Structure formats: C-alpha cells, structure tokens
Image (tube, rainbow, N blue to C red):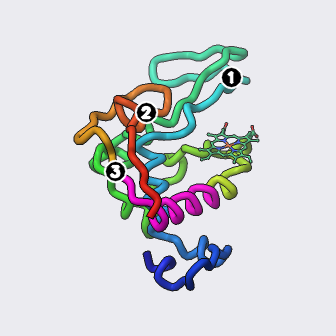
Amino acid sequence: MEIANSMGPGELLSWNDIQNMKYSWCVARESMRLASPSQGGYRVVNTDLKYESFTIPKGWKTYWTPHSTLQNPKYFEDPEKFEPFRFEGDGPSPYSYLPFGARPHICPGREIGRLWMLTFMHNLVLKFKWQTLIPDEKRKYGLAVTPGADGLPIRIHPL
Ligand code: HEM
C-alpha cells in the first residue's frame, strides 16, 4: 500500500515503483512456493549418474519438479505456512527456490513475469474488492497448479 499511497489519482505504475514493491514480491514468491506455476521439465542424463542407491544410466530422460524441494522443511521452515517474510534478507539457500528453474536454462522470461505479477496484484488490490467463495477451502497437492482443491473460486467487484 506504500506505493499506492504515494501515487496521484490515475497515475500509472512506473518501473521505479515496481522495483520498490518488495513486500508484494515476497508475497508473490511465497505464493509460487506453495503453488508453483511450473511443473518442472525434462533433462537427458549425459553421463551415468548415481543418486542415493540408484544409478540413472546415460541417455535416460529424467523429469525434475520443483514441488518436493519447495515443500522441504530442510530449506523452508514450517513449509505449509504462508510466510512471505522468509524471502526477506538473504532468502532461501541457493537452488532451493526453483519456480523459474536454475542454471543455463533458467526462465529468460522471469523478469517480465515479475512485472506482470506485480502489476496484476497492484491493480487487483486497488481497483477491486474480492472474496473467496469457499471458506476454508482445502489445498490439493499434485503436479498441476492447484491453488485450491475446488479451483479457488473468487467473486470480484470493481470499486
Ligand atoms: C510466472 C511466470 C513464469 C514461470 C513460473 C516460468 C517458469 C519457467 C521454468 C521453470 C522454466 C524451465 C527452466 C529450466 O528448465 O531450468 C522456464 C523456461 C522458459 N521460460 Fe518461463 N516462466 C514464466 C514466464 C515466462 C515468460 C513471461 C516468458 C517469455 C516471455 C518465458 C519464457 C521461457 C523460455 C523461452 C524458457 C526456456 C528456456 C530454456 O530452455 O533455455 N517464461 N520458465
């Protein structure tokens, strides 16, 4: 709300405002941790790979998914809790937060994704009143994006 309060009527968000939306970005990141928009992707194993008691032979195709890491208490204390402040300061340890992937194939669209998310959140909060339609809707875990077990229906009213 700090950014919203500093703006004049009808004034549009500037790039500088986006950079200053630090708490909103923590909220977006925590939302992507709990319901990652990405389900992961494929990798071809280019050398025989040992993982715990398994050997994955060269040439096999593997599928990586961010969900188990994003819910792992080793990296995210109290993982089922919605806690945006966990992204403040140094944030999570390297390679534990993977909604955009990592290393050479990390999502090249992540900055524009951030811009879209923050712009959407800003307008949703300022210009609409909204409420969830199913109180205490349960969450559902799976490979697909599941914000709520029944699809998280909401009602939106323009302000
Ligand atoms: C919330 C929004 C987004 C999420 C969560 C997301 C997530 C991801 C993930 C997880 C990957 C795979 C990374 C890997 O294999 O290590 C990826 C790749 C990619 N993303 Fe995104 N993405 C988002 C938005 C976008 C946008 C807006 C664009 C383009 C405008 C984009 C373009 C791409 C491309 C081209 C790749 C392939 C990169 C490669 O294989 O080298 N993404 N994204």
Question: Residue under circle 1?
Answer: 45
The label nearer to you, 3 versus 2, is 3
Question: Residue under circle 3?
Answer: 131
Q: Secondary structure at mark 3?
A: strand
| Residue 90 is at least partly visible in this image | no
> Marks 3 and 2, how far apart in space?
18 Å
Figure label count: 3
Looking at the image, which residue is at 67% across and 74% down?
15
> Marks 3 and 1, how far apart in space?
46 Å
Q: Nearer the viewer, residue 56 or 155?
A: 155
Looking at the image, which residue is at 31% across and 41% down?
133
Q: Count residues near mark 2 (Cα–Cα under 10 Å), then give few for <14, some for 14-19, many for 20+.
A: some
Is 61 on the left or on the right of 78, as rendered? right
| Residue 104 is at least partly visible in this image | yes
Q: Secondary structure at mark 2?
A: loop
Q: Quadrant of residue 46?
A: top right
Q: Quadrant of residue 73?
A: top left
Sequence-earlier tag: 3 or 2: 3
Q: Which stretch is magenta?
A: 114-130
Question: Residue under circle 2?
Answer: 146
x and y percentages locating residue 14 in the rendered image: 66, 76
x and y percentages locating residue 1 in the rendered image: 43, 75
Judged from the image, the quadrant occupied by ligand 1 is: top right
